[in-house]
Amino acid sequence: MTVITIVSPCYQEEDSVERCYETVRQIFDEKLPHYQREHIFADNASSDGTVAILRRITASDHAVKVVVNSRNFGVFRSTFNGLKYATGDAVLLMLPVDLQDPPELIPDFVALWEQGYQVVAGARIERQEGTAMRAFRRLFYLLVNRLADFDIPENVGEFQLVDRKASQLTQFLFQVVSGVRYTLTCFSSFCRSGQHSDGNTGNQSGQCTY
């Protein structure tokens, strides 16, 4: 069965983490019954009840994995830590636990991915974010578009479904922009293994607007 991984970074989310879990589970049960769900929560050393809730969830649902950071690394390093444990054929890079990005679009993302798109990105019509986040986003997609065989518009966020092979490149880029230690020798192998799965050289990115 095809596996779809969802990565959800969280910090002090005891009021919303279970709602996020239930929403994703229901979407897969009702609209993606032929896909296996893997939901990875990357907790940034929460001091509230978030981790306890996640432990209770994992005890009854083996489709859920939890990564608990030893300290608060920030949302992007935390997401990278979650990506390292992803085993899916496609990976939703970041679904915030507060559901500020609509998980209802996941079935649409999967449908486009099944059509051959290696990257399916959600694009907000309007995005409210600070200067630092805007600069980070610009750097991230500058690196992606220079190093990969697909183009991603700058107006998209991290709410995107990527093919397993493309996610290897994405993991490396998360390391670069978040300051995690890396080596260029690893990147070279990612580039080679990150070519289009169908052998085509065309644009392999799709987009959903919300």
Image (cartoon, rainbow, N blue to C red):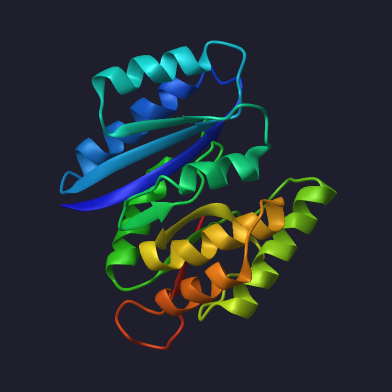
Q: Nearer the viewer, residue 133 or 74?
A: 74
Residue 86, x across and y down, in percent: 39, 48
Seen in the picture, residue 176 relative to 205 is either above or below; the reply is: above
163 sits to left or right of 102: left
Residue 4, x across and y down, in percent: 31, 50
Residue at 30% across / 58% down in the picture? 89
Residue at 33% across / 31% down in the picture? 64
Residue 90, x across and y down, in percent: 35, 57
Seen in the picture, residue 30 relative to 179 is either above or below; the reply is: above
Is any part of residue 14 visible from this angle? yes
- Numbered disc total: 0
Seen in the picture, residue 25 relative to 92 is either above or below; the reply is: above
Q: Nearer the viewer, residue 115 or 61?
A: 61
Q: Nearer the viewer, residue 176 or 96?
A: 176
Seen in the picture, residue 145 relative to 71 is either above or below; the reply is: below
Residue 26, x across and y down, in percent: 28, 32
192 sits to left or right of 139: left
Residue at 50% across / 21% down in the picture? 16
- Most extreme residue toward the right is 131
Is any part of residue 210 visible from this angle? no
Q: Nearer the viewer, residue 210 or 151?
A: 151
Residue at 38% across / 79% down in the picture? 196
